[in-house]
Structure formats: C-alpha cells, structure tokens
Image (cartoon, grey):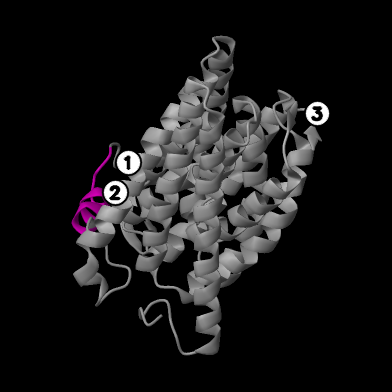
Amino acid sequence: MWFPNAEVVINPALLVFLGVIVGILGGFFGVGGGFLITGGLLVFGVPPLYAVGTGITLIMGASLVNTMKHRQLGHIDFKLGALMALGSLPALYGATRLNAALEAADLAGPVIRYTYVVLLALLGMFILFDYLRSRKAIANDPDAISTARLAVWIQRLSLPPSWVQVPGIGKVPTRVAFPVAGIESVSIFLPVIIGVGIGFLAGLLGAGGAFILTPVLIYFLGVPTITAIGTSLFQVMLTGTVGTFIYATSDRVDPLMAVIMLATASIGAQLGATGTKVIEPARIRFLFGIMVLAGCLAVGLEEVSEAAEIDELSTVASVVLLGVGGLICLVIAALVIKAGRNPGTSAQTGEI
C-alpha cells in the first residue's frame, strides 16, 4: 500500500499488527509505545523524520485511550504528571528544532537510530539486572526493587530554594507531597527536571519518553509500578499532543498510516491496561525489559542492514520486533484470562 506523505510502500497488515501490539504493550507497560512505533516504522523503511512524526501522533492517540482506562483504575498521580509536563513541553519544542537541524545536515537517521540502540540496550539490561537482583525480595513484596535506598535518598534531596515568596500568601515551601505516588515529600523542582529530560527525548526520538520515564519513576523516585505506569501515560499524552502539533505543522506526519495503527491500538489498549490490575509488578517489569532489548536488537539490525546494504537483515529486524512483541502480548492475554478464572488472584500478592 502506498503512503503518499512518507512516500513509502508498506503492507497495511504490518501496520495493523504493530498497532495492536502498541496498544496492548502501551497500556501494560505505561509507555506511549514510541520505542516500538518509531523503531517499527524505521524497520518498515519509513524515512526517519516521518517515522518520528507519525510515531508521536500515534503515541498521542494511544496514550489518550490508555490514560482514560488507567484513570478508571486509579493509577494516575495527576499532580506529579502536570509538574513533569512543565519541564517536558519546552524541552520537546527544543528537540524538534534540533531534529530539523540534523535533517538539514543529513544526520537525522543515524542519530535517531544510534541513540535508540544505546538507550534501549542500557535500559533493558538494567531492568533485567534489577529483576534478578531483587528475586528474593520479590517473593515477599511483588513491587520490590534493588534501588529502594537510592529512591529514598533522591526523595530527600534538597534543591534550592527551599521556599519562594508568593505575593499575598507569603513564604511557600518548595517541597511537596504526592500521596497517590506514595511520596511523602520531594523537591518540587525534581519532577520538572525529570520532565525536561523526558521532553527532549520525546522530541528527538519520536517517543513519548515513557520508556525512560516509567523506569525513572519506579527505580529512582520509588513510585509503585502501577502508579508509575498510569502517571507516565498521562504525561506522555501531554507531550504527544504538543509533539503531534509541531510535526504536523512541519508536514512530517503520514495521517493515513497513523489512522490505521490508532484504530487497532485503541482496541489493544483495553487488554493492556486490564493486565496491570491482575499481573504482579515484578513480572510487568521483567517483560518490559525483554521488550526493550528486542526493540534495541531490531533497530540495530536495521541500521546494519542500511549500512551494509543487506536487505535480509531488515526482514530479520521486522520478525524480531513483531515476533517478540506479539509473543509478550500473548503472555499478557494468557495471564489476564487465567486471572479471570481465579477472581481472588491479585497483582499485589504475586499469586499469578
């Protein structure tokens, strides 16, 4: 099928399959699916900036659906998400300008792919390392992580100023609590700083940034896995909306491609979000680590394919990305069905 804006031919069945995977995994892992979408579109041969622009458009739509579902489940700390957005939205705009400069220098493709490979490799290995290191603790607490002490230390960090003068009110402390996220006190500036980093990655890579944000909230702020997932989706919905507008006005979005994937992603999102309610947090993180490494391998293979002009490697990359993603979706579906047959099973008890 010919997609005129991106000027590329893609089998629409691949886009439908990618959309379903993005919907399920997005709702389950708390990611907009950017590392899958943009990586998948790059693997399918979509030009880098169109992969970024179309990817972030799908992220916006899929994250909206997933945010609504997680809101019903009570998994979102809206105050924390809004503060992160204060930093992410300006950074997002700056990153899109950088992308335009890279395109002019004919460097956009390599920079986007290499950055993806490095980030996904480091992230995936860290998540699996944490899972293996925390296995004994997980037996007693399904949400246990190896960086719990680090998270407490970060929460206690004191970033100046410790208070600000507000006209008509007086001195207002800059430490706030996020009850939904289980944070008793943290500097108000820390979520904003995190938002800056996430927004920059979102604009540069065409990802909502949640593939980094969700682990940051879990491992470095100590936010419970389920709440981190919902809050990440909310923040990604905001950055995705702004990113979609920026890339659409620059004519870097293929609407037909985005609509095909969004239609199927909306269906898959319901299953993914439901999975977070019945599957224990440690297993969610483990599966996320596997998916991230698969995305890393797929994008790496595609880069080698282009550099060495070996078309077969591009096919292998597609099989790796869609194969692992599809397999994890089947695992999620099986665990949800199993939990449905045992209503007493709880994600917090680790009994699945």
Q: Is residue 166 visible?
A: no
Task: Give the numbered dot on residue 242.
Answer: none
- Tell me the mark number nearer the camera, choosing from 3 and 1: 3
Q: Judge whether residue 158 is colored magenta.
A: yes
**Would you say residue 320 sits in the magenta stretch?**
no
User: Quick one: label 1, few (<14), some, or many (20+) residues within 10 Å?
Assistant: few
Mark 2 touching mark 1, by CB under 8 A? yes
Would you name the residue on which mark 2 appears? 126
**Helix, strand or loop under label 3:** loop
- As drawn, the residue found furthest toward the top would be 105
Task: Determine the CA span between mark 2 and mark 1.
Answer: 6 Å
Q: Quadrant of residue 286?
A: bottom left
* Mark 2 and mark 3: Cα distance apart in space: 40 Å
Q: Quadrant of the N terminus?
A: top right
Q: What span is in magenta? A: 148-159
Label 2 vs 3, first from the N-terminus: 3
In the picture, measured across the screen, residue 131 lies left or right of residue 315, that is left
Rounded to the nearest angstrom, the CA distance separating label 3 from label 1 is 36 Å
Going 43% across and 41% down the picture, which residue do you hit? 297
Q: Amino acid at mark 2?
A: Phe
- At horizontal 58% and vertical 41% (from top left) the residue drawn is 40
Q: Is residue 282 above or below residue 195?
A: below
Q: Position of residue 133 (x, y in %)?
A: 20, 60
**Residue 296 appears at what percent x and percent y?**
43, 40
Neighbour tally class for label 3: few under 14, some 14-19, many 20 plus, Cα within 10 Å: few
329 to 189, vertically: above or below: below
Q: Amino acid at mark 3?
A: Pro
Residue under numbered circle 1: 122
Q: In screen coordinates, is 52 left or right of 137? A: right
Q: Main secondary structure of the magenta part?
A: helix
Residue bearing mark 3: 4
